[in-house]
Image (cartoon, rainbow, N blue to C red):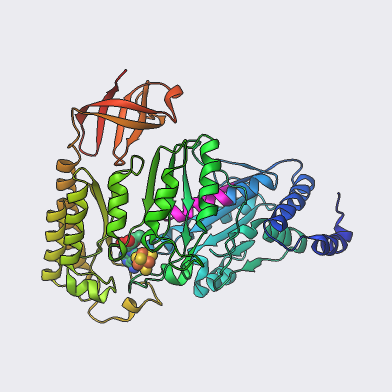
Amino acid sequence: MTIKTDDTNYYREKILREAPETEPERQLYFCERVREIVKERYGGEATFHIETYGCQMNAKDSEKLAGLLLQAGFREAETENADFVLYNTCTVRENANQKVYGHLGYVHSLKNKRPSMLVGICGCMMQEAEEVEKIKKSYRFVDIIFGTHNIFKLAELLFDRLTTGHMEVDVWEGTTEVVEDLPAERKYPFKSGVNIMFGCNNFCSYCIVPYVRGRERSREPEDIVAEIRKLAADGVVEVMLLGQNVNSYGKTLDSPISFAELLRRVEKIDGIERIRFMTSHPKDLSDELIQVMKESKKICRHLHLPVQSGSTEILKKMNRRYTKEQYLDLVDRIRAAMPDISLTTDIIVGFPGETEEDFEDTLDVVRKVRYDSAFTFIYSKRSGTPAAAMENQVPEAAVKERFDRLLKEVQQISSEVCCRDLHTVQPVLVEEKNSHMDGYVTGRMGNNTLVHFPGDESLIGAIVDVYLEESKGFYYMGRQEV
Ligand code: 5AD
Ligand code: SF4
């Protein structure tokens, strides 16, 4: 179908009239319409580039967005020098926002040279009204703005933008809808993230996520299992089950089921050899889950268990709903069941009211648990969260000093802990050609530690036995056992 400028309105109305009302059919229909427009306006194929910030949820969302764009006739480009550039944003800490504004400045200069270029922004930052206002006012070259709840609508939004010429802003406050069966472009052929739930109901007092990702919604177990079966048939051997708080999976479904039960069902899927999940909230981690992990042959011996702080007083102000002692007790129970498990964590330094004594408690937990690694963050004030209004914000210099001390401790322990499997043979999933050493490949052990060893590209996607010859602190050098 060709569109001439003077009959655009007629064309647009006809298309809107004929569009299916149900999903995903409606979006697939708009993908086709955008494909036709792209063909006419960009002389064949147009290119897209997605810049993704933040967590695994966003990475997964970007795979879905890429899937829709491929369906809509775009081809992926490596850089922002593309016909459509989309920023999938994060807002969990202030510096995440700053990075996006930096990129917007750059993409504006590109667009000045290439006026047909389209720029979109989506993700968590767009769920904040003041950020949307700022973009509408000061970044008027942006073409499309949408949030976290309607990423499935990308093609429809593009259609609107291309047929009206107006900046398209569509941010939803929330949703109960989970749109299934949309195309997704996976980054790796052999491993994939799988959303099992969306949103978060915990309202930790420092965290913006419940406001930007909305209330907790679980997918039906049948849909999850069907998706993983399809992935397995497609050659995927490792899945990462994704949710902000996987331990409360299934509680709000019409027929409630536990996360442990979901894991049992995923375990039975032929072809899947490794199961990971992220993130576990300590308050909801059940003994049933520990038992299922212990008995499983596929669930990786790794738990990411964010502690956030070691001080019971601070944990209370953070609304984490566990004490230092309860956390340490949970770690003991996990370790008693699985002595070889790797534990990793997130820690925030400088939460309002944190004293030297509170911080010492955090160091104490770090020394007792001995994490394989820890993501350490300086507290960032997020407006709209309860913590932003708290008194006693800690002075910057004190926070910086504590942060450096914590980092040193974490790194020291991690270099000691990470060599625990030295001189053993471990299964390694080969992920890529080593970019620094010719003739080497890089893979991951079940506990997520990286291993480099001599090998060629044909090994990518296979799980092979590797003898760990040398520990380099955070990774191993090895050789394949044949
Ligand atoms: N400041 C600093 N770190 C934060 N996180 C979440 N919100 C904030 C904030 N306001 C950290 C937590 C969480 C991780 C994903 O980001 O440690 O587990
Ligand atoms: Fe944020 Fe807490 Fe929910 Fe994690 S559990 S997303 S830290 S509110």
Q: Measuring 44% from the left and 44% from the top, which residue is drawn there? A: 239
User: Does residue 91 appear anywhere in the picture?
Assistant: yes
Residue shown at 85% from the left, 53% from the top:
3
Q: Is residue 252 above or below residue 103?
A: below
* Picture coordinates of residue 144, whole percent (x, y): 63, 62
Q: Is residue 270 left or right of residue 184?
A: left
Q: Position of residue 264 (x, y in %)?
A: 40, 49
Q: Residue at x 19, y 53 (%)?
A: 407
Q: Quadrant of ligand 1?
A: bottom left
Q: Is residue 171 magenta?
A: no
Residue 415 placement (x, y as % from top left): 17, 42
Q: Quick one: quadrant of the C terminus?
A: top left
Please report the bounds of the magenta region as a residue range. Answer: 49-64
> Which of the pair 443/197 is nearer the observer?
197
Q: Position of residue 381 (x, y in %)?
A: 34, 72
Q: Residue at x 46, y 55 (%)?
A: 57
